[in-house]
Amino acid sequence: MPDFELIPRGRKKITARGLKFPLLAKPLKEEASLGIAQASLVQNIEQLTERVRFIHEKFDNDVIAEEYIDGRELYVSLLGTTRLQMFPIRELVFGDVPPDKPKIATYKAKWDDEYRHRWGLENKFPTDLDPLIVRKIEHTCKRIYRLLMIDGYARLDLRLAPSGEIYFLEANPNPMLAADEDFAQSAAKADISFPQLIQRIIRLGLSTNRE
Ligand SMILES: Nc1ncnc2c1ncn2[C@@H]1O[C@H](COP(=O)(O)OP(=O)(O)O)[C@@H](O)[C@H]1O
Ligand SMILES: [Mg+2]
């Protein structure tokens, strides 16, 4: 995980002790990138204070401020409980975002088609990932899945830094299941059709054997 600090509502003095800027300030308990915009990336304590106030008030949410990890954005889909299967990894490619600009899956980057088109944002199957890195990702993600006691299926969001280091951003224990979303796309790549996928999820849910 990136180093982080929690900043609860009601906190008067905002500090980021020991953290290296830039930071990404996010609502603690939101999803679908709600409350995540370019302004979430803050370069100093003044910007952090401003963004924290905004999230506290507008989203009525505590804040998690994390060190910003520059790297590739990967989505790892897993199915199972005792026996876990990892599907082929998806990547959000920031095609036309200049190299010196931050790459963040903001609310717009996820949901606004026109914005996605303008910046060349595409969800794809990367073809150039080093097999050793893929194995490391598989090992790490399965451990995280078990540590968090996830049951059935999940999508884990990661960042792969240029150094090869993997940073775990988030686990989605209830990811979007639509056929054109990353989870089902990854399953399809593993030759699991959409109806088969839904059937397997239902069967896992009904199963009593969850030791
Ligand atoms: N520490 C971080 N470093 C770099 N990018 C981040 C970081 N945290 C979040 N992001 C970006 O913001 C996106 C949304 O953050 P995430 O924690 O997954 O929240 P959500 O639940 O809204 O999806 C991520 O997919 C990623 O692009
Ligand atoms: Mg996410």
Image (spheres, grey):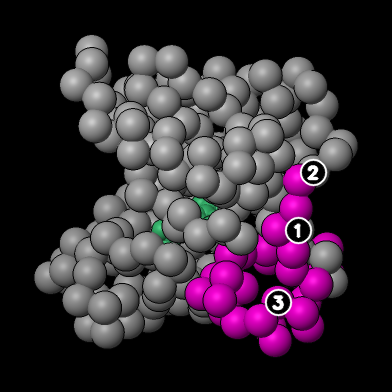
Q: Is residue 150 left or right of residue 197?
A: left
Are circles 1 and 2 on residues that touch, CB within 8 Å? yes
- Residue furthest to the left: 10
Q: Which residue is mark 3?
A: 116
Residue type at the position of mark 1: Val
Q: Which residue is mark 1?
A: 93
Q: Is residue 26 visible?
A: yes
Above or below: residue 155 compared with residue 101: above
- The disc placed on residue 126 is 2
> Residue 62, image x and y in percent?
23, 64
Q: Which residues are magenta?
A: 97-125
Front-most of residues 108 and 150 = 150
Crowding at dot 2, Cα within 10 Å, few <14 / some 14-19 / many 20+, comes out as few
Secondary structure of the residue carrying tag 2 is loop
Front-most of residues 123 and 209 = 209
Secondary structure of the residue carrying tag 3 is helix
Above or below: residue 159 compared with residue 133: below
